[in-house]
Amino acid sequence: MSETPERKRSEVADVDRSLYDFVMPEEGYERYDDGLTPDIVRAISAKKDEPQWMLDLRLKALDTFHEMRMADNWGPDTSGLDMDHISTYVSPKTKQARNWDEVPEDIKTTFERLGIPEAERESLAGVGAQYDSEIVYHNMREEVAEQGVIYSTIEDALHDPKWEPVVHQYFGTLIPMRDHKFAALHYAVWSGGSFVYVPEGVTLSYPLQSYFRLNASGAGQFEHTLIIVEPGADLHFIEGCSAPKYYEANLHAGAVELFVKDHARLRYSTIENWSKNMFNLNTKRATVGADAKMEWVSGSFGSHVSYLYPTTILAGARSSCEFTGITFAGATQDLDTGCKVILNGADTTASVDTKSISKDGGVNTFRSSVVIGRKADRARATVSCSSLMLDDISRSDTIPAMDVRNATASVGHEATIGRISDDTILYLMSRGCSEAEARTMVVNGFANPVSKELPLEYAVEMNNLIKLEMEGAIG
Amino acid sequence: MPDTLLSINGLSAGTEDKPILHDISLTVDAGQTHVLMGPNGAGKSTLGHVIMGDPTYRVASGSITFDGTDITELSPDKRSLAGIFLSYQAPVEVPGVPLYSFLRTICQMRPELKTTARKFRQRVADICKQLDMDDSFLTRELNVGFSGGEKKKIEMLQLLLLQPKLAILDETDSGLDVDALAIVSRGIEAYRQECDGALLIITHNTRILERLDVDRTHVMVRGSLVGEGDASLIDEIDATGFGRFEEALAAKGGAN
């Protein structure tokens, strides 16, 4: 690997696939047999030395997984996913470190290439880095810890007598294991992820970030993220994901449970660049208290197949949700993404603004669901979706669903599908841009409403990803 | 004897199913100001677009030489980098692309204009002042939501930044009020003085020409060049219109 030049994530020019597409040898790793049996589930639980309730939950989830049928085929094809050939647990032989120097060299190199330690030094309050099934690095700035903020793995929280009851109280309550077959799978074999607790009234001035890297081939990643933002607190959490490309299918079935209490605010940003052999069947859900605010910012570039609909339950009065997202589908990608918002409290507001870009035969489906409950007086929701198609062989669909049960509520939906006009390309070319540069500029401009919501370096990364995807888009 | 900058020889061009320009020959020397006049629909804008390399039009015969190089087959970006600039009648809006970073991008891709961020900022500020443009324009998206007059000023801003050897101004004066017209004229004057650039001004309105020293005037009717003269030709057209040229073309049996 050493002949590949080091690249900084903040470089805009000259990115190449080597930024994400490199593999580290798996030698000496602990890898459990493929497939799903109670023995594997017990082994994962025993290795983590879990409380009995967690093992019971896992075994019940395994039964539920076997019992539930696959849903009827309403979305992208998942027949390429064979659970008998997915290893549910692969662990690098290392202990979790608080210092990058203690992280094994190959893994440290991986995260350095992805720019994580650098970002930590410059602009983050804390970082968790997961490699395959286990968190290999976790650290938080001291001043943040002094404010009473907890940022650890769920495994560590389970071993802490103070936090074990809290995890027990919240874990699995927002996303029930019967939610869908892959939620059940998640609870049976979950490993890694993050536990974040922000005490009442505490504002973090810098974001926390977890980065998930799936290095192993034919494996699954099932991290669980549990975030509790107590009343009046404020947190920005960033999630990044990537994996090298393999010919075998990989599976990501994580779960993200977010509890945003009264008057609190949580911003949850994601830049996802799984490799194009990934089945991304991730479940994310937030419940939001009175006068609280949930903000989602989501950039999805990778995966072969995605089913991803972050859900927000606006439970408290005057709570609000903003969802800003972009999905980029290229060749061999079938991405079914969107969001769900359930407005239950009075005077709640939801605003959804999504963009999709399709090229080289990529398929984008935007699916949204807005449910306004009986008691949600004067609730307001607006959904807007715009799609950009870069050629004639790609596809973009919009499937909005609305279920309004309160006569005083108002709901709006707007969808546009467009192409890059020849006049625009001519204009930019006649100022010196090549055709490829002109198209990239237009696509970046289209994505701008999303990228400007991201912290600068992630916006740069997103522009890099767009540039990567646009290369070779001509002719 | 000045150097020939643009030389068009026997050029015929049009869209796939419709010939528009017929056997055009025209020469612009470095630093000269030429005016192309003609009634609506004569093909003036088409000629501007063909010189820029708009792929909407196909060259059926003839050639375009710029600065000693045959550019007939070059794409618009290559022509731009070679030193041709076309100011559009209706500049397109490009959502999400901030004007300032766009300007920076198109300057940085030219070795001769590469400069530091600080010097560039100063240069842009100077030009904005010259064009009576508000700094707040720079953070807005390229041409998005600007009035017609403001868009023309943004074209002038790009012209002065890029300092091309040849600027083709396609109806830059159309739709401008008196004040905006004065500012655009000032921009054109600045371009001539600072860059010693050549101009091909496409217009059917003589107002913008009042303050300019015009070297040559060309008259186009129904896709053919039917008259050429010095600046006095403008006054004649102003007084009598294009009737004489249309009749002359008809007498020749028309272009079609």
Image (cartoon, rainbow, N blue to C red):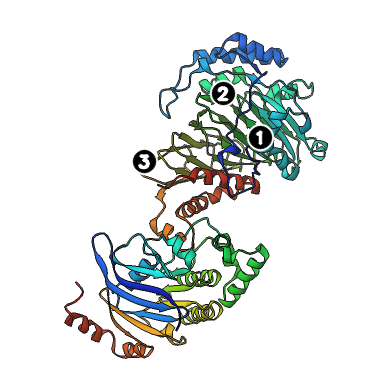
Q: CA distance from mark 1 to mark 3?
A: 39 Å
Q: Is residue B224 left or right of residue A59?
A: left
Looking at the rendered structure, the secondary structure element under dot 2 is loop
Up-down relation of residue B112 to residue A37 (above or below): below
Q: Which residue is mark 3?
A: A393
Looking at the rendered structure, the secondary structure element under dot 1 is loop
Q: Which residue is mark 1?
A: A2
The amino acid type found where label 2 is placed reads Ser
Q: Is residue A169 left or right of residue A59?
A: right
**Residue A318's x, y, as percent?**
61, 43
**Residue A16's x, y, as percent?**
56, 42
Q: CA distance from mark 2 to mark 1?
A: 21 Å
The amino acid type found where label 1 is placed reads Ser
For the point 28% across and 89% down, the residue is: B240
Residue at mark 2 shares a chain with residue at mark 1 = yes
For the point 58% across and 60% down, the residue is: B101
Of A153 and A146, nearer the camera is A153
Residue at mark 2 shares a chain with residue at mark 3 = yes
The amino acid type found where label 3 is placed reads Ile
Q: Which residue is mark 2?
A: A217
> Residues at badges 1 and 3 in contact (C-beta under 8 Å)?
no
